[in-house]
Amino acid sequence: LGLYDMHGNVWEWCLDWYAAYPATATDPLGADSGSNRVVRGGIWGSYAYGCRSGYRDQSSADNRSNYIGFRVCSAAPVQ
């Protein structure tokens, strides 16, 4: 997939607004608006369920925490 180091030390902010997924969904879109953003990924200081790279939760956009960060990425391949 071209993904590297996806098990991070912190949950990562996502652009998506948080909303519960429907019961059956394949590649669902984020909500059109909301008050909380999606955070994803594994975190070192959590129980097992929060350490998975596929973990998904929500957090208010003004939340500050040692457990939340962001991933800098580029569409261009690294040379």
Image (tube, rainbow, N blue to C red):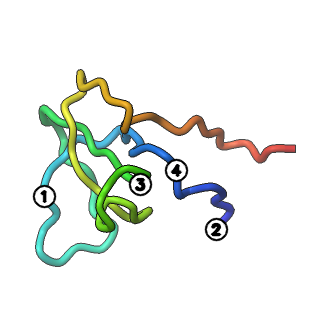
Which numbered disc flags the more N-terminal residue, 1 or 4? 4
The amino acid on which the numbered mark 3 sits, given as a three-letter code, is Gly
Q: Residue at x 14, y 51 (%)?
A: 19
Q: Secondary structure at mark 2?
A: loop
Q: Quadrant of the C terminus?
A: top right
- Which residue position holds label 2? 1
58 or 68, which lies in front?
68
Q: State which mark lies toward you, 4 or 2.
A: 4
**Disc 2, disc 3: CB below 8 Å?**
no
Mark positioned earlier in the residue sequence (4 or 2):
2
| First along the sequence among labels 4 and 3 | 4
Q: Which residue is at a point 29% across and 66% down the rendered structure image?
A: 49
Quarter occupied by the N terminus:
bottom right
Residue matched to label 3: 41
Q: Mark 2: which amino acid?
A: Leu
Query: Residue sitting at 63 percent across and 55 percent down?
Result: 5
Which circle marks residue 76 in the picture? none
How many callouts does the rendering have? Answer: 4
Among the two numbered marks 1 and 3 on one chain, the one whose residue lies closer to the N terminus: 1
Marking on residue 8: 4
Q: Which residue is mark 1?
A: 20
Q: Say few, some or many: other residues with alpha carbon within 10 Å of mark 1 (under 14 / 14 to 19 / 20 or more).
A: few
Amino acid carrying label 4: it is: Gly
Give the percent coordinates (x, y) of residue 46.
32, 54
